[in-house]
Image (cartoon, grey):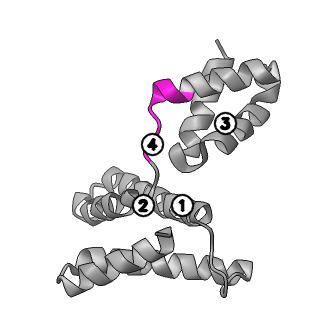
Amino acid sequence: MALAEQIQNDMKAALLGGDRFVGDTLRGLKAAILNEEVAQGKRDEGLSDSEIEQIVAREVKKRHESVKLYEANGRPELAEPEKKEIAVLEKYLPVQLSEAELITIINEQITALSADMSKMGQVIGAVKAKVGTSADGATVASLVKRQLSK
């Protein structure tokens, strides 16, 4: 089943089952997907699963940033719904790679590119192309920097 269909079916099931929070969260995700389809001119054919995963990852990242801001400003009651939305949305992302797995991939790319600090951007790009949405871009960038500075 395509990811878009799965999201649609899960949204329907949540709303029919009386779980408004999950239903509303998925409705917001569907709106973000629709906005991207319109922006790319792909309204009729729809987006691929990998493009939808990128949208989900972007939505999760937005919520992580909101949680960080709310907690930094002493508003944990506003951070809680954001955390719950993250849990709902992460079901539609591939399993995240561990730091050890990421470091292995990063080291492979550093070796393949004979990279030093001046090629940090190339290494980050190569790693992100390989792992896709299985790792957060900021995490990849910080690990690449750490590995290159050794």
Helix, strand, or loop for circle 3? helix
Q: Is residue 46 magenta?
A: no
The amino acid on which the numbered mark 2 sits, given as a three-letter code, is Tyr
Q: Residue at x 66, y 40 (%)?
A: 130
For the question of whether residue 75 can be seen, the reply is yes
Which label is found at residue 136?
A: none
What distance separates the C-alpha of mark 4 from that of mark 3? 14 Å
To which residue does mark 3 refer? Answer: 127
The amino acid on which the numbered mark 4 sits, given as a three-letter code, is Gln
The amino acid on which the numbered mark 1 sits, given as a three-letter code, is Glu
Question: Is the C-beta separation of discs 1 and 2 under 8 Å?
Answer: yes
Q: Residues within 10 Å of mark 3 (few under 14, many from 20)?
A: many
The disc, 1 or 2, on the residue closer to the chain's N-terminal end is: 1
To which residue does mark 4 refer? Answer: 96
To which residue does mark 1 refer? Answer: 53
The disc, 4 or 3, on the residue closer to the chain's N-terminal end is: 4
Q: Residue at x 60, y 60 (%)?
A: 50
Q: Is residue 51 above or below residue 10?
A: above
Q: Quadrant of the C terminus?
A: top right
Q: Is residue 99 magenta?
A: yes
What distance separates the C-alpha of mark 1 from that of mark 4? 12 Å
